[in-house]
Image (tube, helix red, strand yellow):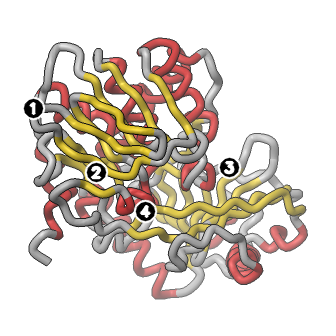
Amino acid sequence: MPVRDRPDVIVIGAGIIGCAVACELGRRGAAVRVLESRDVGGGATQASAGILAPFIESDRSRSLRTLGAESLELWDDFVARAVVDSGRDVLYERTGTLEVATDEPSMRRLEQTRSALLAAGVECRLLRAEEARAAEPSLGRTVGGALLIPSHGFAGVAALTAALRQAGAARHGVSFQTGVPARRIRARPRGGMAVETAAGTLDGDAVVLAAGSWSGGVAVEGGAPLPVRPVRGQLLHLAWIGEPLARVVWCPGCYVVPWPDGSMLVGATVEDVGFDERATVAGMAALMEAVGAVLPEARNAGFEAVRVGLRPGTPDDLPLVGPSASAPRLVYATGHYRSGVLLAPLTARLVAALMLDGREDPLLAAVAPGRFDAA
């Protein structure tokens, strides 16, 4: 859906997805304006642990694994370009993940995952209990084994989002306007698009809707509301006092990300509570119970902070990325649920190819926004 030599694109939403899309569009020559109702990166992005692990859960859908694997391959260049273009440092580690099992059924699931991953050409190794504790000495006696996947890692999402904003603004002419919620998107009778906001109406050649959990609240002329719902995730930041973890540890009921300063992130709850962004005692207690069962020393860790974000879920847990059926120059880039950080570089590339080249990548078939229309 190319529009002209230097299209004027309005991106609604400045989380990790909106910033990645805006930066890629600007890098490729579009004139981009980003609208955000909060601060840049102030929604679900600020509560993300930044895990890059498409192969971590055995029940993950094949489509999501495919998208995640494709996006993981883009991460080295994605971060390197953001660092060079912004002049900012970004934490980025590819030290692997260790998914632990605490009973026989979960160990059998890991064995099945290992076989499937090896058949797909993904390097991984199944560790028995002693090997798992040798790899991570802080693991408790409840751990009966683990699956090590060396290609996985994590990134500092706040720093990366800031770098993308800086790169977009300083190198690619992207403008950011915060505190301005978008209310309605409509097509202009003579071409182009209009975005109605609390501060007035903006005109552009095309629009990208990347407002996360709030995407469904932006009305689209002639279209039904998006099936995007908020799913609360609470994340703990703990001052770890044990032996530093070497990699991300994925446990039953939680995951743990080791930070370079010796602290660790523990997340994340999955709660269907609407637009309630409170941290709760129940959420914190559930995370502490889960992490303490696998890493006993976590019970003595210091408390640094708690973060809460509303992740945009969809009925099938797959994103909504692609053109709108009701508005010819509107592209959706939302509904990424727990994979927004992982899928950011791929989403940016797919959206830019669609908007600037008119090329609809085959990967978009699985995440087409119209897949729920007949439901």
Q: Quadrant of the N terminus?
A: top left
Residue at figure coordinates x 35%, y 74% from the top left? 59
Tell me which numbered mark, 1 or 4, is placed earlier along the sequence.
1
Tell me which numbered mark, 2 or 1, is placed earlier along the sequence.
2
| Residue designated by label 2 | 67
Q: How far from the left and from the top, in percent, is residue 53?
A: 46, 53
Report the side of 212 relative to 145 (left or right). left
Report crowding for label 2: few under 14, some 14 to 19, many 20 or more residues within 10 A (C-alpha).
many
Q: Quadrant of the C terminus?
A: bottom left
What distance separates the C-alpha of mark 2 from that of mark 1? 37 Å
Callouts 3 and 2 close, C-beta under 8 Å: no
| Residue designated by label 3 | 246
Q: Which mark is residue 312?
A: 4
| Residue designated by label 1 | 190
In front of the other: 109 or 70: 70
Q: Secondary structure at mark 1?
A: loop
* Labels 2, 1: front one: 1
- Residue 89: image quadrant is top right
Answer yes or no: is residue 141 visible: no
Q: Amino acid at mark 2?
A: Leu
Where 206 falls versus 371 (above or below)?
Answer: above
The outermost residue toward the bottom is 104
- Residue 353: image quadrant is top left
Residue at figure coordinates x 40%, y 28% from the top left? 33
Answer yes or no: is residue 323 visible: yes
Residue at figure coordinates x 54%, y 40% from the top left? 94
Q: How far from the left and from the top, in percent, is residue 163?
A: 57, 27
